[in-house]
Amino acid sequence: MPMLGGIMLARFLQAGLDDAVRGDDRADRPHDVACPSRPAIFGRTTVRLFALLGMAAIVYGSLAPFDIAPGKTLNWWLGWHPLVIGDAVTNVLIYLPMGLLARLAYRRRGSHWLGEIVFALCVVVTLSYLSEVYQTILARRVACWADVVFNAAGGGLGALLAPLLQRMLRNQHAWLYRELRTQPFHAAAFAVLVALACYALLPLDIRPTRAHVERAWSQLTATSWSVPWVSASDPARPLAPLRVYDKLATASAYGFLAFLLVLAAQENSVRMIFPGTLLPGHAPKNHPDTLFSVWYGLTRAMWVVF
């Protein structure tokens, strides 16, 4: 599994800067046997939807839990407070995707780069300022001009990186589209592996201090093996039903990943026995390419499991 994930991740990252993988994504390519049809691309409607979702997430994260303090009123003039490095970095990183998405939502063929950046900055600054103004009536929030400045810096940085990221996303999307047609189980296993890694690691509150690492290692080694419905630290104490469900759901996800890895391994066997099986028009006689590959993988996987 680590080898497959590492290989697919390396190829995925490499494809981001390889324009030859994408080619002309606005027309069909009948000369390409593996991928003759035009790959779908991220349109402006999709980008605008992501931008709206990002704005909603930022507003919710900035204002939650919406605990309005009695007696406070909206103050349109914000104050200045001592700089906190951690808060400044957080403000930059949070609004970086917003500036990126705002520029991509406005960007089109023929538009000037300066107008795109100005539009993105206007969106970011307006959203940040209104959020800070609303924070003036919240009990647990501190509104500050410095937050607006660092939010604008993050949005500007995202707007500057937007063309590069758009290029990488289009290339990687075309690569994934091609892989799903030529190596569907490899691509599916890679996608599930990335999703599970994100689920296991989020939130990324990394504290790489020696004391923290030693404490985490001691907790891991002290954990006993136990059945899913009891606590690992205290096998005599049963878990709550929701925790049991969470454990079983996670185990099911890893089981699905193992199933896809078996199919990916059998996919290589199909190519060795029938070269070109997964390519349209190159399947063995009397064996439709996609159905045969799926049936072969399923039967071999069931044989391995049972």
Image (cartoon, rainbow, N blue to C red):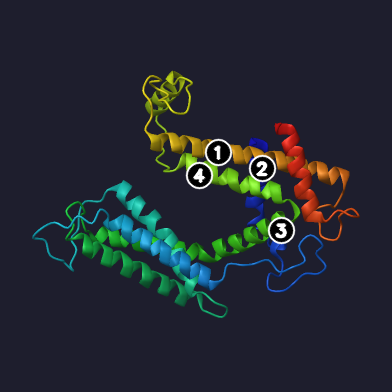
On screen, residue 174 versus residue 100, left or right, reads right
What amino acid is found at the position of numbered circle 4 in the picture? Cys
Q: Residue at x 21, y 51 (%)?
A: 82
Return the residue at label 3.
Answer: 178
| In front of the other: 103 or 44 | 44
- Residue 207 seen in this snapshot: no
| Cα separation between marks 2 and 3 | 18 Å
What amino acid is found at the position of numbered circle 3 in the picture? Arg
On screen, residue 243 versus residue 26, left or right, reads left
| Cα separation between marks 1 and 3 | 28 Å
| Cα separation between marks 3 and 4 | 24 Å
Q: Secondary structure at mark 1?
A: helix
Q: Quadrant of the C terminus?
A: top right
Of badges 2 and 3, the one in the foreground is 2
Residue 305 lies, in percent from the top left, at 70, 32
Badge 1 or badge 4: first in the primary sequence: 4
Badge 2 or badge 3: first in the primary sequence: 3
Badge 2 or badge 1: first in the primary sequence: 1
In the rendered image, which quarter is residue 281 located in? bottom right
| In front of the other: 303 or 36 | 303
Q: Secondary structure at mark 3?
A: helix
| Cα separation between marks 1 and 4 | 16 Å
What amino acid is found at the position of numbered circle 1 in the picture? Ser
Residue 79 lies, in percent from the top left, at 18, 60
Return the residue at label 4.
Answer: 198
Return the residue at label 2.
Answer: 260
